[in-house]
Amino acid sequence: MTVARSGRFAGERDPAFVALNSSLALDWRLWREDIEGSAAHARALERAGALTCAERKAIEDGLAAVGREVESGAFVPRDEDEDVHMAVERRLTEISGEVGAKLHTGRSRNDQVVTDVRLHLRRVVERQVEALRALQQVLLERAGEHVETILPAYTHLQRAQVTSLAQHLLAYFWMLQRDVERFGRARAACLELPLGAGAAVGVNYLIDRDAVAGDLGFERVTENSLEAVAGRDFALDYLAAAAQLGVHLSRLGGELVLWASSEFGFVRLPDAYSGGSSIMPQKRNPDAAELTRAAAPRLTADLGGLLGVLHGLPLAYNTDLREDKRYLFDAVDCLDQLLPVVQGLIEGLEFDTERMAAACDSFLQATDVADYLVARGVPFRDAHHLTGALVRECLERGIGLDEVLLEDLRRLSPVFDDDYAATLDPRASLARKALAGGSAPASVRDQLARAAALLASGG
């Protein structure tokens, strides 16, 4: 039996409109949640006296059969089904007979679809948080290998001061930690049950919504039926978290593109995540890192797209809301593809630690020189000016800060002494950054311990 079109209409719909109106390409992935939610609804209808025990059992058995057919490939939707909900109901009715047509009692596709999406998205978040945790673990392990590996820290993409490779990698660990927390809040927003809101104003059956919520693993029911079917804040929360994650991953990808260049030469990307050229045989392109960099605008556009759909929509449901899945699932697919690639890329990186150390020229210790003067009683602003003058003189002479004679230093300030040379050791400079969160090896080891404890606790 085919699920009939409403008797409100006398003729058939135009094929072009049918194609436009179909959301199967977007929402078929919700079939599992649709079956799960429908089974819970059938149980609620039995409790409300709208189905007999035998009818409820026939519906549940039929839904289970539909699920098995989808998994085996024996059942695929047809164009005329319009969406996943109609496809599942059609096949249920074909299997179970007229009792299948009773399933939609006390329910609208408006509250049905948003229930399915919330169910689906909370599982997506769980899967992607697990992937983020795995990526954090890789960053933690690689950082542990390089606590004392020095390289320049950059500001304005200019060499600034000495840091450690571990400190640099851990910066991304903490970015991802905030992403995990944002995704956690997005999952929490999925835990309100919309089912029971009906098309907009509730339904005429005393369905125990709290029981349905418990049945489906929701923590609470929505407070307002109009907002329940019209709201997509939970999807926006996910997309906002995804966009921020995309920015973090993009920054990581962008740095790897730079570091893999001949001009930097800090890293060699693994063959498994590199590309070649169709014309230049020598090329080794950072394709995976570039695609990581490109994820940010895609994910940000998904967030902007859904915000645009929701902008100005009157309450309650409007067909515009079908577009939520276009943006939501694009972001889901983007991250599902991207996260394992980024993990593999970081696992396979080969760092050129000698090249990194060689980039730590003596000018990176200019701030240490200024602090050296401060320790001898020179006010910082004066020390900053004197050190700047020293840097300018060195650049004009084509020498480094470590090549200036003591007599020349004392012409700038009499407080310079023989111990000045020790100020210019990059590893000593690193060790001086021993405050909490600093780049000193001791501080980084403390940071590693905190990060490892955080991962172990699942926090």
Image (cartoon, rainbow, N blue to C red):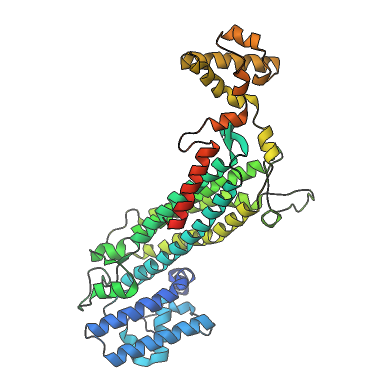
Q: Is residue 422 visible?
A: yes
Between 167 and 86, the one nearer to me in the picture: 167
Between 455 and 385, the one nearer to me in the picture: 455
Q: Quadrant of residue 147?
A: top right
- Quadrant of the image containing the C terminus: bottom left
Q: Looking at the image, is 443 positioned above or below residue 349?
A: above
Q: Position of residue 384 (x, y in %)?
A: 51, 17
Q: Is residue 99 left or right of residue 430?
A: left
Q: Quadrant of residue 359?
A: top right
Name the residue rendered at 24%, 72% in the picture: 210
Q: Is residue 1 left or right of residue 431?
A: left
Q: Looking at the image, is 343 positioned above or below residue 382?
A: below
Q: Is residue 124 left or right of residue 150?
A: left
Q: Position of residue 282 (x, y in %)?
A: 79, 48
Q: Looking at the image, is 178 positioned above or below residue 370?
A: below
- Quadrant of the image containing the N terminus: bottom left
Q: Position of residue 319 (x, y in %)?
A: 36, 65
Name the residue rendered at 54%, 52% in the picture: 295
Q: Is residue 117 left or right of residue 275?
A: left
Q: Position of residue 151 (x, y in %)?
A: 62, 36
